Image (cartoon, rainbow, N blue to C red):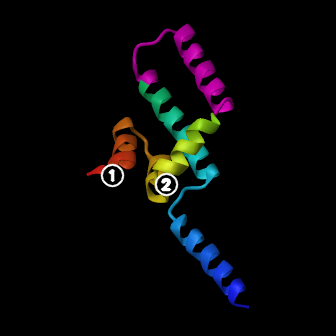
Amino acid sequence: MRALLVVVAVVLATGCANSNKPSKSACARMHDQYLDVMARVASIANLTDKQKQALADTKAELKRRRSDEFISKCRAQLTKAQVACAAKATTSDELDTCVHVAEN
């Protein structure tokens, strides 16, 4: 019985320690939002139709190839609040503020 209590305590402590860690799906949403914001910023520039198509193709490819490395870094280095903030950002400045809020 005592061993079971120790295991439960360890599991609960581990769960509580990671409760501020963003989920994989939250990091994926943040990644997609980042790409959307960067594409929006680039589209404001005077681009030719060919350049706009290349930008759209690149964005689609980056979304398809979302790397495990990005997700791992997101989960290890950011909090749920930072990821939620970044997933709602509409400008590059807002994105920057969201992910660097803990440093200030």
**Which element is circle 2 on?**
helix
For the N terminus, the quadrant is: bottom right
Q: Of 12 and 3, which appears nearest the observer?
A: 3
Range of magenta residues: 42-66
Mark 2 vs 1, N-terminal side: 2
* Residue at left offset 30%, top offset 50%: 103
- On residue 15, which mark appears? none
- The percent position of residue 41, horizontal first and vertical second, equals 42, 27
Q: Is residue 77 above or below residue 47?
A: below
Foreground of the two, 70 or 14: 14
Residue in view at x 52 percent, y 67 percent:
17
Q: Nearer the viewer, residue 100 or 16?
A: 16
Q: Residues within 10 Å of mark 1 (few under 14, many from 20)?
A: few
Corner quadrant of residue 89 = top left
Query: Label 2 amino acid?
Result: Ala
Q: Residue furthest left?
A: 104
The location of residue 32, given as percent across then percent down, is 57, 38
Residue 69, relative to residue 17: is it above or below?
above
Give the label on residue 84, or none: 2
Q: Which residue is mark 1?
A: 101
Q: Amino acid at mark 1?
A: Val
**61 inside magenta stretch:** yes
Discs 2, 1 touching: Cβ within 8 Å: no
The mark closer to the camera, 2 or 1, is 1
